[in-house]
Amino acid sequence: MLSNSKENQTIYEINESSFMEVPSRWARKVNEIGLSNRFILISKYPELWVYIGEHGDHLILSSNGSPLYCSCKGFRMQIEKRTYKGCSHIYALKIAIKFSRYRDISNKISLSDLNKIIEEIMEVDYSSHLREILVKQDVS
């Protein structure tokens, strides 16, 4: 039952401790994603990550290595349902950080590159610009 009165409303705060325990049905997928080398750190301040996925790219905002937001549809659906379980990318990022299974290009891209990557992901769920940067770095 929904209520408009303040005393019956639950306020949810998403912070560094929000997504500590992985839901058991997600454990296998989370481990697979976390060890996949598909996470890219694109900015340290604010801490922004990209997960290069099979079905699109996802932008993840975190604080001190603790994910707070993911642009994937699953995360947004959890927020709409008010279940606040997060998504597999949120939990997988913690694994990627723990086992150093990510690439850090944050000090190698410009502010305009960062803006373009964010814009592409938020508009079309895919950043061709990020891929161009990664290819150039692999060649160098």
Image (spheres, rainbow, N blue to C red):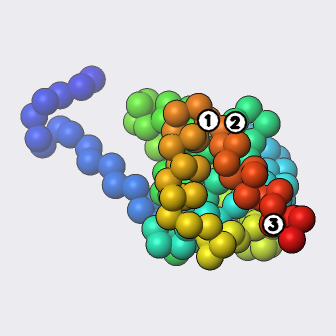
State whether residue 9 appears in this view: yes
Local SS, label 2:
strand
- The local crowd at label 3, few if under 14, some if 14 to 19, many if 20 or more residues have their Cα within 10 Å, is few
Residue 48 in percent (x, y) is at 54, 61
The quarter in which the C terminus is drawn is bottom right
Give amino acid for label 1: Asp
Inter-mark Cα distance, 3 to 2:
21 Å
Q: What residue is rendered at 10% in x and 34% in y? A: 5
Mark number displayed over residue 137: 3
In the picture of the structure, the residue carrying the numbered disc 2 is: 56
Local SS, label 1:
loop
Q: Nearer the viewer, mark 3 or mark 2?
A: 3
Q: Are marks 2 and 1 in contact (CB under 8 Å)?
A: yes
Query: Which mark is first along the chain, 1 or 3?
Result: 1
Q: What residue is rendered at 48% in x and 35% in y? A: 76
In the picture of the structure, the residue carrying the numbered disc 1 is: 125
Q: What residue is rendered at 33% in x and 49% in y? A: 12
